[in-house]
Image (spheres, rainbow, N blue to C red):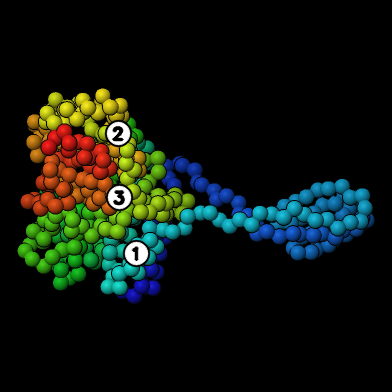
Amino acid sequence: MHSSTLEGAIEASASTASIASAPSCGEGTLESPPKKRPTGVLRAATITGWGFLSVMVSFLSLSWFGVEWCFHPCVVLLRHRTETHVERLVPMEHTWTEDNLESLQSHILSEEQKHPGATGEFTWIISAISLAAKAIGNKVRCARIQDVIGDAGDVNVQGEMQQKLDVISNEIIMRCLGNRDNVGVLASEENETPLLLRRRDEGGRYAVLFDPLDGSSNLDVSVGVGTIFSVLRLSNEGSREEAMLQKGANQVAAGYVLYGSSTVLVLTTGNGVAMFVLDQAIGSFVLVAKSLQIPSGNKTYSTNEAYTDGYSSGLQNYLKWAHKNEYSSRYIGSMVADVHRVLLKGGVFLYPPTTDKPDGKLRLMYEANPMALIIEQAGGKAVAGDDRILDIVPKGLHQRTSVILGSVDQVDAILSHTT
């Protein structure tokens, strides 16, 4: 597709998304701050007397009974007149808008310019994900008002009770991505089998895997939840399901959306990590940080210590060592929120194997792989036992794994006790 045509289509999609993301549920609208005028010195020559009208540099001055009224599109001045004179007004500071106007779509298009062979197909996938994120974010904000909090009454393939918003979020992502002609397969953590949409010869060259709403059990107490996604390029070999069983290092993109005090989208396409925040006023994700790097030296770990008795002796020794060395514990119980804090603040997140879950609990392809790619692209480290997570070749779509990820120094501190 020609770049100009693609850009126009994306702008149309963004416009539609803006409507979808408009404030609802009785919330107020945000007003833009007043614009500032460029620097300029406005002078008004006035003469005392009866009705007098003088226009100079778009400035209107009216002198009446010794009192002068000065009108301007931005100001109204009232001052007492005693004699004929020329007045010099104080120059205004020359300031242009400081609003961030680089959108997610603009960022992806600029990244494509670095790759001469890019077709623009990948941009359509990210555009669909951003649209889905806006719709899900709106549902999350209005969850209690719209009575979509609580169990849906079904158990998913993972053996977990589905929340109402799990089902809704899954449906939204399926609909947004399902009509993208270049998406061949959609695989959700909530569904036992992937949805086969198009053969490769029909244009279905990509597979998108996702966890529609990680941490959904925390919704009723307003804790941050999120969407995790992974994009793979499908090979021509084997069945469509077999073509998806690729190691995480083959991901062409990965990211997550955090629905919290703001809606944050973090994305990597294998060339660093960028962070976007949804500006509700314009309905667009705008770039707030790029080339993110995980800080080192933060003595913080994130794990559910209620399971400590089921951890290996090495991990138990690590926790004892951390307590003695004045480490802090920060655990939210929503992987997206916990990993987001580690990405920005440093430290380590661990969800290790336990005696009752020896293979770990998190899903390799839906959670561990996308998070591991983000962390490594930000200069961190992600392992499962002694193995690099991104090197694990999956045997099934719902394969589970243990996870330790974060800044290199803090991950190594754990490995020094377990290996």
Residues under labels 1 and 2: Cα distance?
Answer: 34 Å
Residue type at the position of mark 3: Ala
Residue type at the position of mark 2: Thr
Residue type at the position of mark 1: Glu
Q: Does residue 359 appear in this view?
A: yes
Query: Which of pointers 3 and 2 lies earlier in the amino acid sequence?
Result: 2
Nearer mark to the viewer, of 1 and 2: 2
SS at circle 2: strand
Q: Which residue is mark 2?
A: 300
298 is higher (above) or lower (below) than 104? above
Q: Which residue is mark 3?
A: 378
Pointer 3 with pointer 2, Cβ within 8 A: no
Residues under labels 3 and 2: Cα distance?
Answer: 18 Å
Image quadrant assignment for residue 269? bottom left
Query: Which of pointers 3 and 1 lies earlier in the amino acid sequence?
Result: 1
Quadrant containing the C terminus is top left
Please report the residue visible at 25 percent of the width from the left and 50 percent of the height from the top. 376
SS at circle 1: helix
Bin the neighbour count of mark 2 within 10 Å (Cα to Cα): few under 14, some 14-19, many 20 and up. some
Q: Does residue 366 appear in this view?
A: no
Please report the residue visible at 17 percent of the width from the left and 51 percent of the height from the top. 390
Residues under labels 3 and 1: Cα distance?
Answer: 17 Å
Q: Which residue is mark 1?
A: 111
